[in-house]
Amino acid sequence: MEKSNKRESCTIRLASINVGTLTERSRDIAETLKKRRVDTACVQEMKWKGAKLRDVGDGYKLIYYGTTVGRNGVGIIVSDSYPDFVNGVQRVSDRLMSIKITEGGDTLRVVCAYAPQCLCTDEMKECFYRDLEALTQKFEENESILIGGDFNDHVGSCGDSYERRHGGRGYGTRNEERKMLLSYAEAADLAVVNTFFKKKDEHLVTYRNGGVATQIDYMLMRRKELKNIIDAKVIPSDGIAPQHRLLVMDVRLQHRRPVRPMVSLQRIKWWKMTGCETELQGMVKAQ
């Protein structure tokens, strides 16, 4: 008997963390993600070379990209409940990549970003944002976008002239001379999600080093979908990275899921893709 389409929703938890290096930390990070019920995590500064997929344990797979051993590198960790729906990977640079998750006729684009540090040249910073803008401009209007990253930028505690991008509940003082992240969010019609929730400082600060405490890691989403965000906060107690703190965001995704015919679907053979030497390219369809 044919059933009519109906509106459904699901809640997912996205995380972002600059790990400093993933060497000898991948298992600890996977354990923490499981403990915190994270579905997908963006990781920056992995310092691994390659375009591969690895099993990191506790029911998680890591898709990553790096061009130089010991420098930069980005990755996206996905729960084992997602692999059948990951059908696209875009590797832009060792600072920027995305995956495409399609399920039930709906598409979610998860982007991992690692912006150049403050001591890098303005040309490098501008190049990064040009690449990020070019990447997200390719996404369809009906696709959800979730961006997690270390942007090495201070958006400050107040929204000021960026009220639609900044919720007025950030931390610290804004980089008035640059405002590159907020300018990008304005152009792309995105919201910096972890500035929209009232939190104690310990749940806003994403970076600590000695006596320095700042907010430089952010989650971004389409402004029109901001109403679907349940919460966004820093979890300060896990200590899985030497300086950065785990940032998590809970989002309710609503979609119309059609009833699909009972056919045998070809599954991606993830168990054949483990091992450092296995290339991810070709196993999923590059977009």
Image (cartoon, rainbow, N blue to C red):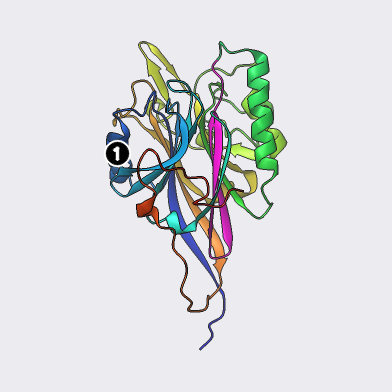
* Location of residue 138 in the rendering, given as x and y in whole percent from the top left corner: 69, 45
Query: Is 166 situated left or right of 112 in this image?
Result: right
Q: Where are the magenta residues, as a range?
A: 95-117
Q: Residue at x 40, y 57 (%)?
A: 269
Q: Position of residue 195 (x, y in %)?
A: 53, 33
Residue 177: tell me if it is visible.
no
Would you place residue 16 above or below residue 120 in this image?
below
Front in this rendered view, residue 115 or 284 = 284
Front one among 276 and 174: 276
Is residue 282 depicted above or below 164 in this figure?
Answer: below
Q: Is residue 265 left or right of residue 255?
A: left
180 vs 135: above or below: above
Instruction: State the image coordinates of residue 16 (x, y, percent, origin top left).
Output: 44, 35
Question: 90 or 269: nearer the eye?
Answer: 269
Residue 107 shown in magenta: yes
Out of 234 and 1, give the one closest to the viewer: 1
Kind of residue sitting beneath label 1: Thr
Q: Is residue 286 magenta?
A: no
In this view, 77 is above or below 8: above
Place of residue 35 in the rendered image (x, y in percent of width and height, measured from the top left): 28, 44
